[in-house]
Amino acid sequence: MARKAERGIGALDMLRVEVLAARIEAFARADPDAGNLWRSELAVAEAVASAAMEDLRLSETDLLPRVAGAGRAGADPVAGELALAVIRAMKAPGDPIADTGPALLRYAAAAGMAGLPAEGMSGLFDDLRDDDPPILSAARVAARFAQATERRAPIAERLLFMGVEGALRGASARRSGAARIEDDPLRGLSGRVDADWVALPALALTDGGFRPWSPGSAAGLADLFFGLERVLAAEIGRIGRARDWLRRARQVGEGRHGRSRLGDAAQVFAEAPCLSAPLLAERLAITPRGAINLIGALSEQGLLREITRRRSARIWAVPGLAERLAARPKPGARPPQPPRREDPAAMSRAFADLDAALGRAASVLGRHRGG
């Protein structure tokens, strides 16, 4: 991948990434519950990777103790709280194009950024069109935001990247503007995802090593796209696992007399993949004991795993998310990286070249479809 990045990013390279992302988007749109499960899991991984890029020592296993009220020796509480805030922002990013101010403030707050500059925000979305390639457009906006904020909050830049990319993907399906912020007692680990993002910038740049986040440089743009190509190729298989879980979950209530509460419980976990028994009981309007029995039956089917092992705070999750939160070695902070020089003129030339190449490619594809 390093050799690829050295030669820069071309239109065909970018189109490969957009095609991979479009395949995942299509799977998620065809079955929204599968998209919700996939994004719920990946939000955890992306938030931890984003924190690691800022020299914060954190792993997925540090998040659950923050929620369940059990401290972990050696865990950084500041990093844990930041990651949970980033997860919540990713799961309800709003639409930064249609409702810019609230979305930007949400990203800044999640990143621990004290306010936004008074100038430089108005031109973020200049020349942006709904039919622009989502990933390239998101990189352009993130680069402008980085320049306007003098690189004070890279985490907010990445949240904006994901917000713009998701808003462009969801433009034809919905453009509601404000985020639907669900009251999640598990502080981001549960609750439905109200987003359409597919590209995962921090995971792309930390998969197989650390590469700088620098959407405003040619080398940084190449690192991002080549990292996304590798990550999204793997994620096609992961969203397939989510679809398989849903298939099995939807079968558990079949063939039973009357209304199946087991099937209802499985559907609740499809929408909120990390829950305690009291939360499930509240959603189904049943007793806590009834919820425990349903959770036990789903666990016997391999559809749920207990992830806390604490009598005072028992929490279950679907297997994909449970694997993310299971014990694993803690990643170290990123090694020192030489700063990449942001060159606005070079960035503008790179985007212009890519736009021209994509326009030619779209024209060719259009002729083939028309013929």
Image: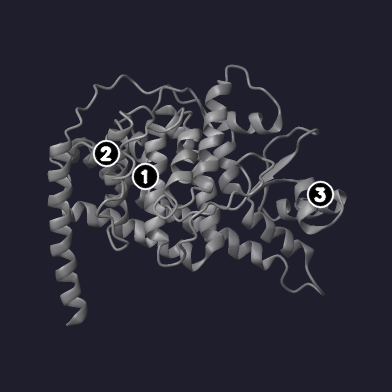
Q: Where residue 161 is drawn, which disc sits there?
A: 1
Identity of the amino acid at label 1? Phe
Residue 285 found in image quarter: bottom right
Say whether residue 348 is left or right of residue 179: left
Which numbered disc covers residue 31?
A: none
Q: Secondary structure at mark 3?
A: helix
Q: In this rendering, is residue 101 above or below 368?
A: above
Front-lying residue, 322 or 162 = 162
Other-residue count near label 1 (Cα within 10 Å), few / some / many at <14 / 14–19 / ≥20: many
Labelled pair 2, 1 in contact (Cβ < 8 Å): yes
Residue 34, x across and y down, in percent: 53, 59
Q: Earlier in the sequence, mark 3 or mark 1?
A: 1
Instruction: Please give the name of the residue rendered at 13% of the width and 38% of the height, measured from the top-left corner.
Output: 345
Tell which tag, 3 or 1, sits nearer the viewer.
1
Cα gap from disc 2 to disc 1, whole angstroms = 10 Å
Label 3: which residue?
292
Q: Under tag 2, what secondary structure?
A: loop
The N terminus sits in image quarter:
top left
Please tell me which residue is depicted at 80% across the width and 34% down the height of the picture: 311
Position of residue 45 measured from the top left corner of the image (x, y, whole percent): 48, 39
Q: In the picture provided, is 344 more to the left or to the right than 201? A: left
The residue beneath circle 2 is: 215
Residue at 23%, 52% in the rendered image: 14
Q: Is residue 44 left or right of residue 294?
A: left
- Rendered-image quadrant of the C terminus: bottom left
Residue 202 in percent (x, y) is at 38, 37
Mark 2 packing: few (<14 Cα in 10 Å), some, or many (20+)? many
